[in-house]
Amino acid sequence: MNDKTELTEEDKSLLLNHDYDGIQEFDYPLPNWWKLSFVLTVIFSVPYAIYYLAMGGPTLNDELIQDMASLNKVRTAYAVKMAKFDTDAYSAFEGPEGIALGAVVYEDNCLSCHEEKGKGDIGPNLTDAYWIHAKGTASTVYEVVLNGREDKGMPTWKEDLTKDEILQVVSYLMSIKNTNVEGGKEQQGLLIK
Ligand code: HEC
């Protein structure tokens, strides 16, 4: 590599006056943008400290409480919106595409208890005309899926699935209703024609 003798006069003027086992270093000045940003942070810190330390600016905890309050407002509004069966939104999922989306939601979340094609196991057979809680219609099935029947082993889904996902899985259930799949679980509930 470069020998020390190849350094220009300017290089040499920047060379620091120390030597570690033959290794020397240059003393380049910090770039101006860096110095400027440092000065700006120092200037910024003065009103910042006055506001937060002396003028009663919100603490992290205050900000958390405010954020949680507005988050809860959004959550409540969403829960209220979700509780109502949205006919318009549902109609968008009634076709084959919506049913296919619903089949995926079903496989991921419901299959473990309601088994393949809805034939039933831990949960009831969803392919017959007998219903325990729902009345066989999209809106009543929606309500059961949304709120669950936790005391009877059917989980609530409003926390884990979006409104659209529930509407899709309802559309899927409507498509398998009354298909009386082979090997299905015995009838439970009331016959709804
Ligand atoms: C942990 C097991 C379990 C899972 C997972 C589960 N269910 Fe259920 N489900 C049940 C049980 C048990 C019942 C019946 C409760 C009873 O006997 O009163 C039920 C009932 C239902 C009913 C009402 C049937 C009727 O006859 O009125 C519907 C609809 C339903 N489940 C849909 C779903 C959907 C959709 C999913 C997935 C998003 C799902 N379930 C996931 C256990 C489950």
Image (cartoon, rainbow, N blue to C red):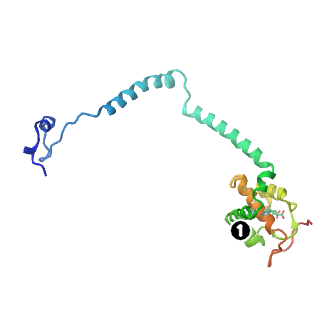
Res 100 quadrant in image: bottom right
Above or below: residue 16 compared with residue 156: above
Res 38 quadrant in image: top left
Q: Is residue 8 visible?
A: yes
Q: Is residue 153 visible?
A: no
**Left of 27 or right of it: where is 190?**
right
Residue with the mark numbered 1: 111
Residue at 73 percent of width and 72 percent of height: 116
Res 104 quadrant in image: bottom right
Residue at 69 percent of width and 55 percent of height: 161
Image position, residue 21 (x, y; %): 12, 47
Q: Does the residue labelled 1 lie within 8 Å of ligand 1?
A: yes
Which element is circle 1 on?
Answer: helix
Relative depth, front residue between 82 and 2: 2
**Left of 110 or right of it: where is 40?**
left
Image position, residue 118 (x, y; %): 77, 70
Above or below: residue 67 compared with residue 133: above
Image position, residue 90 (x, y; %): 78, 55
Residue at 13 percent of width and 36 percent of height: 10
Image position, residue 127 (x, y; %): 82, 70
Q: Would you call the spot at circle 1 few (<14 residues within 10 Å), some (14-19), or many (20 or more)?
A: some
**Left of 133 or right of it: where is 121?**
left
Above or below: residue 122 compared with residue 168: below
Q: The residue under label 1 is which amino acid type?
A: Leu
Count of numbered marks: 1
Quadrant (top left/top right/bottom left/bottom right) for the C terminus: bottom right
Above or below: residue 21 compared with residue 10: below
